[in-house]
Structure formats: structure tokens, C-alpha cells
């Protein structure tokens, strides 16, 4: 079992995953190529810790101890750890290139886990030395709150890598569910229709997006589909829709909605840009 984790990508997901790691006792290296993102991540970690103090969940001494476990860096040479979780941009060639750079500076036993929502872990493995160390570790947004992690075993992933990831999830107090590499894994495949059918209703003029959110929340869903898409990010959500559509040979039930395509074109990506279906100040 490892006591050090490196997270590559300090955006929405990477920041939340790093928070879980440091909060649960791991020395945590948080790496991003963009210094501003890293500064925002640092502020967001501090804010989350202050919130936990306010709620009497942690003491200020614990806050200091958690902060001390963090290294925030823009230097890839700092990314040396037995487990590296990548949460960078959803582009296979960029993820493969990052893993290759990390392979050059890490032991061959270092595990590389991808937080991808939509890419094939089998595909990522093919481009990397020691592919048996590559697996999926799919956290949900917001990662510091959501309990579920899909642990994805690809064709060449070793049992030892999966075992370590499972233990890390346990120490992070997550509920880990193992699945075999397949388009959308479990949750994104099932949930795709939550988003796509909801957008179809709006397209057909059957209901407004606000009304759909309201009724879904009234039936017990924690978040309506449109609020959830804003939280996830329209670009990320569209990437998942597109990738499932491709993977299922353009089956109409997985076809991306023009609504989400236009939102991405207009840069209305949701909470992270201040505007998606809703506006955020
Ligand atoms: N947003 C979600 O709800 C969600 C949920 C589960 C999984 N994911 C997955 O997590 C990953 C990240 O998504 P996100 O929403 O956090 O994206 P994001 O855009 O918020 O953050 C991505 C970060 O990666 C950084 N980056 C890009 N290239 C890099 C490189 N080569 N090295 C280091 N950093 C680099 C960017 O500067 C950016 O800060 C994607 O694979 C996505 O599919 C997203």
C-alpha cells in the first residue's frame, strides 16, 4: 500500500480527488501545467477545510496537517509516486503523452490510474510501457463528497494494480465498484439517458429545462439533469455522449443532443464558466 499519491490535473476533478487523498492521510502531489488552475485549487482546498472547521468536522490543527501533506506543482519532475491518478483534459493522445512522460521518471511498478469518463482504458494501455499498471479510477463530481469510484480493469491490468487501487479507495473512504473496461463503464452508460432524454423533451418543446429539473428532484433525484450537466461541465458531458455514440456504432439512443453541442460551441460550459443552462455569479 502506498502513502503517497500524485494527481495530474488540478481542475474540477483533480482538485477534489487530491482533497480526498490528503484528508485521508496520503502525501499528495497536485500537478497542473496551468499555474492559475493550481492557485485556484489551493484556494479551493483551503475553503473546503475552513468549511469543515465551521461544521466542527475537523480542528484547525487537522487543517494544518492536511495542508502540510500537499505539494502543489507545475513541474512534472515532482510527479514521482507509487500511484498517479490523471484527471487532465479528455483527449487520449494528451493522456498517453502524459503517462509516457511519467513512465520516464517513475518506477515501472508505479500505478497509472485514469479518471477518464469516456475513454477506453484498453486504448490508453496500448501506448504506454508496462501496460499492466494502467487502470481506471473513475471518481464522481464533486470528488470530495461523492462516495462512488468505478475501478476499471482493462485487458492487461494486473490483479496487483487493482488490489492496490481498491485499498487506496478504502483508505479514502470511498465505495469502490470493480468493472471491466466498456464504453461509459456502469454509471455513465446508465445515466446517459437521464441527460439525453431530458434534452429531447426540451428540443420537442414538451417542457422547460427548469420544469424537468424540478420534477426529477421532486421524484427523489438529488439533482435534475440540467443542474447536473452544469455541474459536470457541458464539454465533459458532450465528450462522454460522443464517445458512447461512437462506441455503439451511432446507435440513435446515444446520439448527442444539438442542445449540448450548441452550448459547447457558445462556451456555455456550466458552473465552471459561470453560465450553462443556469447562470452562476
Ligand atoms: N467533470 C466531471 O464531472 C468529471 C467526472 C468524472 C470524471 N471526469 C474526468 O476527469 C478528467 C478531468 O476533467 P475535469 O472536469 O476535472 O477537467 P478540467 O478542465 O476542470 O481540468 C483539467 C485540467 O487538466 C490540466 N491539464 C491539461 N493538460 C495537462 C497536462 N498535460 N498535464 C497536467 N495538467 C494538464 C488543465 O490545465 C486543467 O486544469 C477528464 O478525463 C474527465 O473525463 C470528469
Image (cartoon, rainbow, N blue to C red):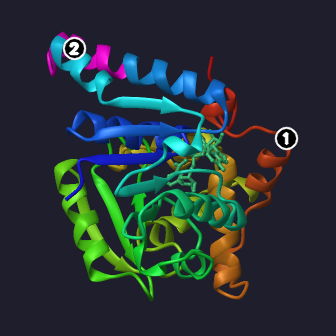
Q: Name the residue: 58% across, 44% down.
A: 76
Q: Which stretch is magenta?
A: 48-60
271 vs 217: above or below? above
Camera-nearest residue between 114 and 253? 114
Q: Position of residue 252 (x, y in %)?
A: 70, 81
Q: Mark 2 near ligand 1 (CB under 8 Å)? A: no
Disc 2 versus disc 1: nearer the observer? 2
**What residue is shown with label 1?**
266
Q: Mark 1 near ligand 1 (CB under 8 Å)? A: no
Query: Is residue 51 on the magenta stretch?
Result: yes
Is residue 253 rendered to the left or right of residue 267?
Answer: left
Q: Position of residue 78 (x, y in %)?
A: 49, 41
Q: Residue 192: which quarter of the image? A: bottom right
How packed is label 2: few (under 14 Cα within 10 Å), some, or many (20 or more)? some
Q: Name the residue: 70% across, 88% down.
A: 249
Tag on residue 53?
Answer: 2
Amino acid at each position: 500500500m502506498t502513502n503517497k499519491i500524485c494527481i495530474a490535473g488540478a481542475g474540477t476533478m483533480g482538485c477534489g480527488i487530491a482533497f480526498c487523498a490528503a484528508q485521508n492521510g496520503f502525501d499528495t502531489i497536485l500537478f497542473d501545467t496551468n499555474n492559475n488552475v493550481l492557485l485556484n485549487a489551493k484556494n479551493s482546498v483551503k475553503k473546503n477545510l475552513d468549511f469543515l472547521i465551521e461544521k466542527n468536522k475537523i480542528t484547525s490543527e487537522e487543517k494544518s496537517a492536511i495542508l502540510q501533506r500537499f505539494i502543489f506543482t507545475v513541474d512534472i519532475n515532482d510527479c514521482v509516486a507509487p500511484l498517479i491518478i490523471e484527471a487532465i483534459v479528455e483527449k487520449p493522445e494528451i493522456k498517453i503523452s502524459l503517462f509516457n512522460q511519467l513512465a520516464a521518471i517513475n518506477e515501472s511498478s508505479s500505478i497509472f490510474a485514469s479518471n477518464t469518463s469516456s475513454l477506453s482504458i484498453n486504448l490508453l494501455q496500448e501506448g504506454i510501457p508496462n501496460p499492466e499498471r494502467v487502470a481506471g479510477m473513475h471518481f464522481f463530481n464533486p470528488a470530495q463528497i461523492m462516495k462512488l469510484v468505478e475501478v476499471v480493469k482493462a485487458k492487461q491490468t494486473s490483479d496487483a494494480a487493482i488490489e492496490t487501487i481498491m485499498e487506496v479507495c478504502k483508505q479514502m473512504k470511498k465505495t469502490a465498484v470493480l468493472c471491466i473496461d466498456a464504453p461509459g463503464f456502469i454509471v455513465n452508460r446508465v445515466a446517459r439517458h437521464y441527460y439525453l432524454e431530458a434534452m429531447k423533451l426540451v428540443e420537442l418543446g414538451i417542457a422547460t429545462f427548469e420544469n424537468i429539473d424540478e420534477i426529477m428532484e421532486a421524484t427523489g433525484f438529488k439533482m435534475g439533469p440540467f443542474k447536473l450537466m452544469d455541474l459536470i461541465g457541458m464539454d465533459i458531458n458532450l465528450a462522454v455522449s460522443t464517445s458512447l455514440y461512437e462506441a455503439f456504432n451511432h446507435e440513435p439512443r446515444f446520439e448527442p443532443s444539438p442542445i449540448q453541442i450548441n452550448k459547447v460551441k457558445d462556451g456555455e460550459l456550466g458552473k465552471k464558466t459561470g453560465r450553462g443552462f443556469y447562470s452562476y455569479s
